[in-house]
């Protein structure tokens, strides 16, 4: 193995802005995080979905509440109308 090729590997105390701290190893001598799994909304279950621009409503209005069954029925209906038009 070549000497001086790989970076130094340090024992590091990781600190989050919420106050959580744990030990790990890293090539950086210090790690300071803004958000971690202890305070992230996705992992804590305190996530709120905010639809300020009405994108979800516009999508459901345009395409409707589609399921796989309704798409299959629509495809069969489209095929039957094409077959009827050819005859």
Image (spheres, helix red, strand yellow):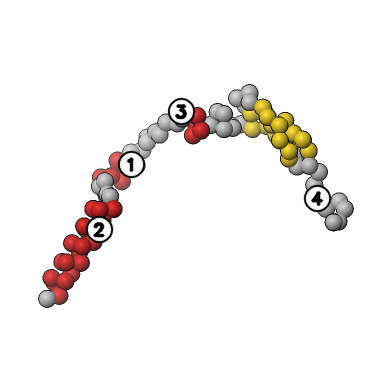
Q: Where is residue 12 in the image (x, y as percent from the top left)?
A: 74, 34
Q: Separation of disc 1 and disc 2 at Cα? A: 23 Å
Q: What element carries label 2?
A: helix
- Spatial CA span between label 2 and label 3: 37 Å
The residue at which mark 2 appears reads as 72
Asked if marks 4 and 3 touch (Cβ < 8 Å), the reply is: no
Rendered location of residue 15, percent (x, y): 67, 29
Q: How many labels does the image show?
A: 4
Q: In this view, does 7 lie to the left or right of 56?
A: right
Image coords of residue 13 (percent x, y): 72, 30
Mark-to-mark CA distance, 4 and 3: 41 Å
Which of 67/54 is in front? 67
Vertical placement of residue 15 versus 73, above or below: above
Give how far apart the Cα atoms at labels 2 and 4 are: 56 Å
Q: Which of marks 4 and 3 is nearer the N terminus?
A: 4
The disc label shown at residue 6, or none: 4
The answer to whether residue 29 is left or right of residue 78 is right
| Left or right of residue 43, residue 30 in this image | right
> Which mark is in front, 2 or 3?
2
- Seen at 16% across and 71% down, the residue is 83
Name the residue that disc number 1 marks: 56
Q: Residue at x 59, y 32 (%)?
A: 36
Identify the residue shown where x is 13% and y is 70%.
84
Tag 1 near tag 2, CB within 8 Å: no
């Amino acid at each position: 193995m070549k000497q001086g090729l790989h970076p130094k590997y340090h024992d590091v105390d990781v600190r989050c802005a919420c106050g959580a701290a744990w030990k790990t190893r890293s090539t950086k001598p210090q790690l300071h995080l803004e958000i971690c799994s202890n305070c992230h909304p996705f992992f804590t279950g305190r996530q709120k979905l905010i639809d300020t621009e009405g994108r979800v409503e516009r999508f459901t209005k345009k395409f409707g509440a589609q399921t796989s069954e309704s798409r299959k029925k629509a495809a069969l209906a489209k095929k039957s109308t094409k077959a009827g038009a050819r005859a």
